[in-house]
Image (cartoon, helix red, strand yellow):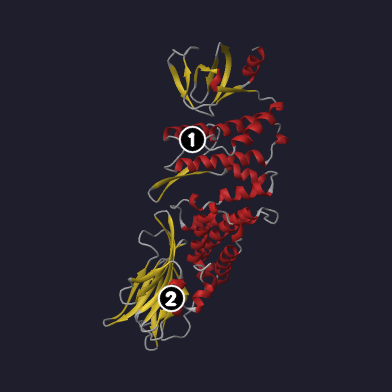
Amino acid sequence: MAATLAAALAALAIVAQDQAPLRSAPRDSAPPQAVLWQGDSLEVRGVKGDYLQVYDHRRERAGYVRASLVRPQNLKAESAPELMAVVRFLKDTPGAESLGIAYAAAYLRAAPGEAIDGEIFDAIGAMAERLARRASSARAGKTPEAVAAHLEVVAAYGIEMVSFERDGQVQLCYNGDAQRRVLALPATEAQKAQAALALTRHECVSPTITPVERYTIDTWRAEVLDRVKSADLPEVLKNRLRLRKAGVWASLAQQRARRPELGAEAVRQAGQRAIDELAAINKSELMESDAGAYSDAAIRVGASRWAAESDLPGTTKAAKVSVALTAGQPGETCVHLLDAKHDLKHPLLSRCTYGVVWQASATANAQGTALALAVQPLDTWREMWVFRQGKEGWSVEVLPPAADGPGLGYVEFAGWVPGDKQLLAAKEARSAGRYQQSFEVLSLTTLETQNRADKPGSLNLFHRWQSPLWKARTVAIR
């Protein structure tokens, strides 16, 4: 008992259970002063029977807590290895994030400076990330009250969360301070890779930032990922890095296309880098848990894939009809439809957009009565403009990848069906939280889907008339 009292009085106690009462007196019948949650740190000031007399600095309140509900900690240097062992155990324990971060904080207080490396911050970052995901999910393992309480507990240890609205829900993300420390301190390459992945999550980029801010952030994300030396990493971790790089470089390709001062070569390099990273995925080592990330990366690359073939500015190759681009209002691009009798000053049709127009994608049918063009309003969303000649002249209609966008998706021209009545299209999008892919035969008159399948070979028209150039370049077939 004397040894326990000495240990308790030495430093602090960490609350090990949720909803532990802090009472006004050392007895069960005493009214509670506050409700404590796992991870709360208490200054121990004495022992009274089965109770510890404590002071809660976070709530600025003194009281008594049953000794069985807390774990007294000695913060001397010799206790650091034991504290680190507990952190390693709790690092991968769902629901114990606040408790693990409390032990990590105790370790940082106890360990000598020269002993602190990237491992402890890798653990803190992993637990903070998992807690943020739990808080963002409607299917959190504990009640919302417990999750909110755990967020308050870790905030007392300097864990800062950022939040923003995405798709009608609040997205909570850790600010990444621990992962930045992993990259700055001695750490294994696996730990640095995990830190880079945590710092570059797509869903943790605020949707409300300006294009200039987004370009800066994505450039930084690409640099962080490229600093990781992946040669000796497990193949699974290499795949995850490639998937993230593919998505980041696809975003950069679209953003570079919006900045003419960077030049077409910078756009092509970013687009090709995204395609190369996706192509480098080792599918035999792709885990089932990464299937969603693979589809996500493929859609992002698919949305920007024309960047690898960009030839801005200019006009399309010779055809019965073609398009030319001019600058409109600030940030706007105007598309002009031309033929042998209609030049830039007298186009068949003109339409302007704030999206990126991939001029190299313009493809006319043999009769010169229709033309398909890829236009990308967002880095993750690419539409198809279909120009058609009718009885009243030319018109253009926008075909989106999905009805509930813009979000994550692309639709692309895949071929013309002889007869001037149908065209082929490939679509891939995330809709209602699910990844969907389809190959479709569309009516050229109404652009309504006449037939669809999840594989191009399942449709006779698609199998016969798909464009060889599309088949060679698309990421929809992978």
Residue 56, percent from left and from top: 52, 22
| Nearest to the observer: residue 471 or residue 22 | 471
State whether residue 14 is above or below residue 23. below
Residue holding disc 1: 151
Q: Are marks 1 and 2 in contact (CB under 8 Å)?
A: no
Residue 107, percent from left and from top: 65, 31
| Nearest to the observer: residue 204 or residue 88 | 88
Q: Which mark is residue 462?
A: 2
Element type at mark 1:
helix
Hey, which quadrant is residue 157 in on the image? top right
Residue 329, percent from left and from top: 39, 68
Horizontal side, residue 444 vs residue 268: left or right? left
Q: Looking at the image, which residue sits at the far bottom?
A: 341
Q: Amino acid at mark 2?
A: Phe
Q: Amino acid at mark 1?
A: Leu
- What is the C-alpha distance between the residues marked 1 and 2? 53 Å
